[in-house]
């Protein structure tokens, strides 16, 4: 589990705002070096390949055990599209010391660097209002045994849980992330009883990272 954690699970970056801040905390009992960058979320990409209109400062710093650090996210352009949100990913890599205090340099140990990714959502000014109502416009479509989520809005939506057949929980595929104006196969194999129930209960994540309940009708193609 990551020892360096952020104060929230996502960052909303409004158009027209030059920077936003995020506080990181080192919960380890030893110091670490932290490297940060913003990219498109590719898990195998490093900071040298990062291309995004947002940069974090400082890009590298040391955090003592229990220490906090304010991270500035600066918008440097160019402007993304303005008719829908754009998604980027903030990476912070925590690098532990080779030999923590009190440990023999000759002792056998495994050193692990931990990389955490979190969403940075750039929100155009024209979309300042309406993000909280976006989940109410989600729709669900059944095609055979596959359940698709349809997001007709210009906002990103994240589903953390789904329930069918009067409350039967089902696994959420595709990490529950719905891009603007998209449809995603969200359940690989829906239970047979779904044909008799036309309601989908779901949980979505708001701008503050809190879980919110939602309900939508289910249609069949």
Image: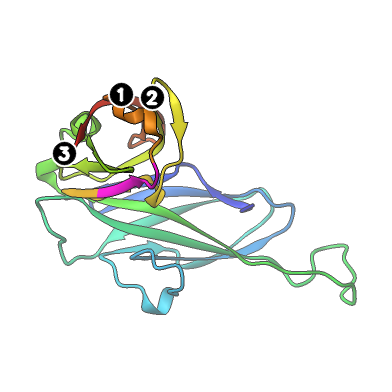
Asked whether disc 1 touches disc 3, contact meaning CB atoms under 8 Å apart, the reply is: no
Magenta stretch: includes residue 123: no
* Other-residue count near label 1 (Cα within 10 Å), few / some / many at <14 / 14–19 / ≥20: few
> From the viewer's perspective, is residue 190 above or below residue 54?
above
| Residue 95 appears left or right of 84 | right
| Residue receiving disc 2 | 165
Q: Residue at x 45, y 67 (%)?
A: 43
Q: Residue at x 62, y 50 (%)?
A: 67
Q: Earlier in the sequence, mark 2 or mark 1?
A: 2
Q: Judge whether residue 85 can be spotted in this image.
A: yes
Residue at far top of view: 166
Between marks 1 and 3 in the image, the one whose residue lies nearer the viewer: 1
Q: What span is colored magenta in the figure?
A: 184-189
Residue 83 in the image, given as x and y percentages of width and height: 9, 51
- Quarter assignment of residue 139: top left
Asked whether disc 2 touches disc 1, contact meaning CB atoms under 8 Å apart, the reply is: yes
Q: Earlier in the sequence, mark 1 or mark 3?
A: 3
- Of 50 and 24, nearer the camera is 50
Residue 53 in the image, given as x and y percentages of width and height: 25, 65
What is the tally of numbered marks visible in this picture? 3
> From the viewer's perspective, is residue 21 above or below residue 138?
below
Instruction: Give the secondary structure at mark 3.
Output: loop
CA distance for labels 1 and 3: 39 Å
């Amino acid at each position: 589990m990551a020892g360096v954690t952020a104060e929230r699970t996502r960052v909303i970056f409004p158009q027209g705002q030059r920077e936003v801040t995020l506080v990181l905390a080192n919960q380890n009992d030893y110091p670490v070096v932290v490297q940060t960058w913003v990219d498109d979320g590719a898990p195998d990409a490093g900071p040298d390949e990062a291309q995004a209109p947002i940069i974090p400062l400082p890009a590298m710093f040391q955090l003592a055990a229990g220490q906090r650090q304010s991270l500035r996210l600066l918008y440097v352009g160019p402007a993304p599209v303005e008719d829908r949100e754009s998604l980027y990913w903030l990476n912070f890599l925590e690098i532990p010391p080779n030999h923590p205090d009190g440990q023999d340099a000759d002792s056998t140990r495994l050193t692990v660097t931990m990389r955490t990714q979190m969403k940075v959502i750039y929100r155009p000014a024209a979309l300042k209002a309406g993000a909280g109502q976006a989940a109410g416009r989600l729709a669900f479509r059944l095609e055979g045994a596959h359940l698709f989520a349809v997001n007709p809005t210009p906002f990103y939506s994240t589903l953390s849980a789904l329930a069918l057949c009067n409350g039967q929980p089902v696994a959420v595929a595709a990490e529950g992330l719905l891009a603007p104006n998209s449809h995603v196969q969200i359940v690989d194999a829906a239970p047979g009883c779904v044909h008799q129930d036309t309601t989908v209960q779901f949980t979505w994540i708001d701008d503050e990272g809190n879980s919110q309940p939602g309900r939508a009708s289910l249609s069949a193609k």
